[in-house]
Every structure is written in C-alpha cells, then in structure tokens.
Amino acid sequence: MTILVTGMAGFIGSNFVYYYLRRHPERRLIGLDNLTYAGNLDNLSRLTEEEKKRFAFIKGDICDTELVDRIFSENEIDGVINFAAESHVDRSIHDPQIFLKTNILGTQVLLNAAKKHWQLPDGKWRSLNSREGEETRRDHSPRRTNNEQRTTPKFLQISTDEVYGALGPTGFFTEKTPLDPHSPYSASKASADLIVKAYHDTFGLPVNITRCSNNYGPYQFPEKLIPLMINNALNHKPLPVYGDGKQIRDWLYVKDHCRAIDMVFDDGQSGEVYNIGGHNERENIYIVKRVIEILREKTGDGEINESLIKHVTDRLGHDRRYGIDPTKITQELGWKPTIMFDQGIEMTIDWYLNNREWVEGVISGEYLEFYNKNYKI
Ligand code: NAD
Ligand code: DAU
C-alpha cells in the first residue's frame, strides 16, 4: 500500500511517519508538505535506512491542484491521511486568511483528486493494491463486527476536538456534539470536516474524520503550551499564562494519537467520525507548575521556579474546557491510551532537554519575529 501523508513534517505528522513505517513494514508513505514555519524535514532524520526507502518526500502545497493531481497520476495512492494545516489558534486570531486557504481549500483539493483518481467509470471505487505479503493483523485487535479487511482506498481527515467549541464544568464531547467552533482555526477545521462529509454523502467517497484532544510529545513546535513553557523556563524567561490559567485541556501523548489514526485508517467504518482522547483533563496552570517542578528536579536549576509565571491578557474567545468521550473508538476499534500523563510529560521533558539544538533551530527566523511582535512580555 502507498499512502499520501500530508503535513508530515510537522509535530503529529512526523511522529506518525516514525510510528507507521515501523508498524507496517510492507507499506510506503509519500509525504507532501510545503514546509511552513511549523514544518521541518529534520524531524524525520532519525528514520532508518530501510525506512527511508519506503518514504518519499515532495515539497509542495496541498492547495496546488496541479501538483496534487500529478502525485495521484504518477503513483497508485491507496489512501490519504491529511495532517496538513495551519494549527496554532493564536496565529489564526492574528491572521485568519491562510487558515481558511490551507485548512479548507487545501482539504477540498485533496478530496477532489482522491475522487477523480479513485472513482471508476461505473461510479464504484477502485480496489486497494493487493495486501499480499502484509502481516495478518494485528496486535491492536479491533473489535469491529465486520472482520473483513477494507477493500477500497480511504481519505482520513485529521481534525480536532476544537470543532465542538467549549464545554462547561461537566459533560464531554461525543461524535454527536454539534459543531460550534469559536476561533478562526477551529472554524476552518470544522469547515473542512463538513467538506469531507459532503464528499462522502454526495459522491460516496470512503472517508473518516478523527477529532483528537490536545497532543504533547517530541517535535512539537515551541509556540504551543508545553514546549513553550519548557523552553522559556530553561532560558529563565517569563511563562505567559493566559488569563487565570484555569482553562482545561484534555492531554494525549502523541504516540497514542498515532495508534488511533492507524486503527481508524484501517478499520474505521466509512463515513464515520471518531473522537480520540484519554480522559486526562488538566488546568493550564497545573501543566505549567508541573513542567517547572520536573525541570527543576532534572536540571537542579533553582532559578526555574514559579516566580517565572506571568499571567497575561487572555486569548480572545478562549475556550474554557475541552473533554473527549472516547467510548466509540474504544468500543468499535479497541483503542485505549497507553501512556499516562505522568509518564508522558517526563518523556516529553527528557526529549526537549536532549534536543535543545532542535528547539534553537526551529525558533529562529519567522517564528521569532512573530513571537517578538505579538507575545513579548
Ligand atoms: P503542525 O503545525 O505542527 O504541522 C502542520 C504541518 O502542515 C507542517 O509540517 C506544515 O509545514 C504543513 N503545512 C501547512 N500548510 C501546508 C500546505 N498548505 N501544504 C502542505 N503542507 C502544509 O501541526 P500539528 O500539531 O502536527 O497538527 C497536525 C494536524 O492535527 C492538524 O490538522 C491539526 O489540526 C490536527 N490536530 C492537532 C492537535 C494538536 O494538539 N497539535 C490535536 C488534534 C488535531
Ligand atoms: O484541542 C486540540 C488543539 O490543541 C489542536 O487542534 C490545535 O492544533 C493545538 O494547537 C491545540 O490548541 P490549543 O489552543 O488548546 O493549544 P495551545 O498549546 O496553543 O494552548 C493550550 C492552552 O494553553 C490554551 O488554553 C491556551 C493556553 N496557553 C497557551 C500558550 C501558547 C497559555 O496559557 N499560554 C501560552 O503561552
């Protein structure tokens, strides 16, 4: 099988490439990424020589209709996993337009190419390349009732829990929760979800949508809460907490997200949405204090302490609480998180301590300019 993975030079995409090539030694990935400030090809430098043979990279924009069409013409693509997006809420508040272009139009360009190249003249969908030689699945033992393998290509849209808006103090997002996005970022992701649904409902394109909660782990760009706090604390810089810091996010270690994506891609029922989350809700201020505590222990640096915390003006339209109900993916596909927060945050902090040159590399240039202009304290 050959799968087109877009946005694979970013945080989740690069973690997914490592996970997937190891998990499926018979499959090939073609990566498409235009390497924005958030995309970094070095993220994939640790692939083995054998894995590199099963991975091809194309630098390009998912909005480029001709390029995307050419990729489909020149390769027999058996599936698309669309990670490519502008992903940072603060940036979307500052400058929404690129979010609409990449996240909505780019998704539609990919859907259109998939439809064009996968649909047969009789309206049916072409068959997958033979899976002969593939391992018989699988250690994640799906519980789906229909035990047959998928026979058609599939388009998997990587969406987000933010499309559901914000929760009050109780309740969870289920797949039936109405879409109610608040930021330009989440509105663009919700729009993309609706276009994906439209291609399924109108044309019958085999699709899934996953909506995951906040991820953390290696290779996350240090504009997002956890890596930003790690990096600022190591440099004794202020730790900017928006508003009262009591907003709640539901944190999932990125590898558990990658496992869920793999399972939905192979076994998700076409047309269905799957929420992904591990019931790990924490207030932002808890996260910041925990990062300080672990970093101080690991480095012995007494200057890393709570006096670095600085409450700053709240994010506009800031969603108060997210919380995922993962019952559907657990019951249908047998997915469960395997890395609990206390373990995951240690692993993440260790990774950032061991990869300080990576951080320096990615925060030079455009990011720094943006950060200084918008978030200087
Ligand atoms: P990221 O910002 O780290 O990476 C995005 C990648 O997409 C980058 O490599 C970037 O270069 C690429 N890209 C951007 N515009 C592109 C374009 N026009 N054409 C080709 N490539 C382009 O994002 P992430 O955190 O890895 O998120 C990946 C996906 O997962 C996004 O769709 C996001 O909405 C979704 N998601 C993220 C989280 C999270 O906590 N980070 C949670 C749930 C869902
Ligand atoms: O829920 C999934 C979403 O999680 C993804 O769809 C997004 O792509 C991803 O960026 C993330 O969005 P958030 O806005 O939740 O993540 P961020 O790391 O930007 O912020 C997490 C929380 O921390 C949020 O409540 C805002 C707060 N925050 C963030 C930053 C960067 C601060 O208090 N200070 C900060 O400096």
Image: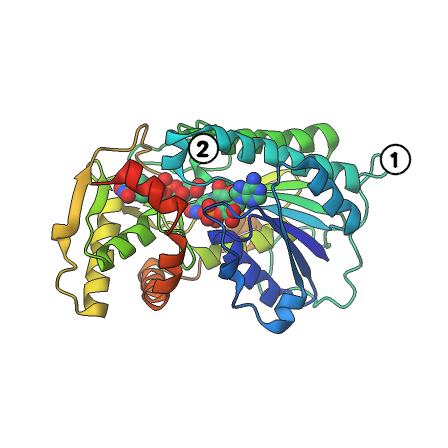
Mark 2 vs 1, N-terminal side: 1
Q: How is the image coloured?
A: rainbow
The one nearer the camera, 109 or 340, is 109
- 301 lies left or right of 189: left
Nearer to me, 313 or 290 = 313
Residue 196 visible in rendering: no
Q: Amino acid at mark 2?
A: Ser
Of badges 2 and 1, nearer the viewer stands 2
> Where in the figure is residue 167, as x and y percent of width and height?
35, 33
The quadrant where residue 130 appears: bottom right
User: In whole angstroms, how far apart are the C-alphas of marks 2 and 1?
Assistant: 37 Å
The residue indicated by pointer 2 is: 186
Mark 2 C-beta closer than 8 Å to ligand 2:
yes
Name the residue rendered at 54%, 35% in the picture: 103
Mark number for residue 212?
none
- The structure residue drawn at horizontal position 57% and vertical position 49%, both measured from the top left corner, is 332
Asked if disc 2 and disc 1 are in contact, CB closer than 8 Å, the reply is no
Instruction: Specify whether residue 192 is in view.
Output: yes
Where is the C terminus found, in terms of image quarters? top left
User: What crowding class fits label 2: few (fewer than 14 Cα within 10 Å), some (14-19), or many (20 or more)?
Assistant: many
Which numbered disc covers residue 122? 1
The residue shown at (23%, 63%) is 295
Q: Of residues 109 and 160, which is closer to you in this image?
A: 109
- The picture places residue 270, in percent across and down from the top left corner, at 67, 41
Would residue 98 appear left or right of 321 to someone viewing this image? Answer: right
Above or below, 223 against 359 in this view is above
Q: Position of residue 87 (x, y in %)?
A: 45, 41
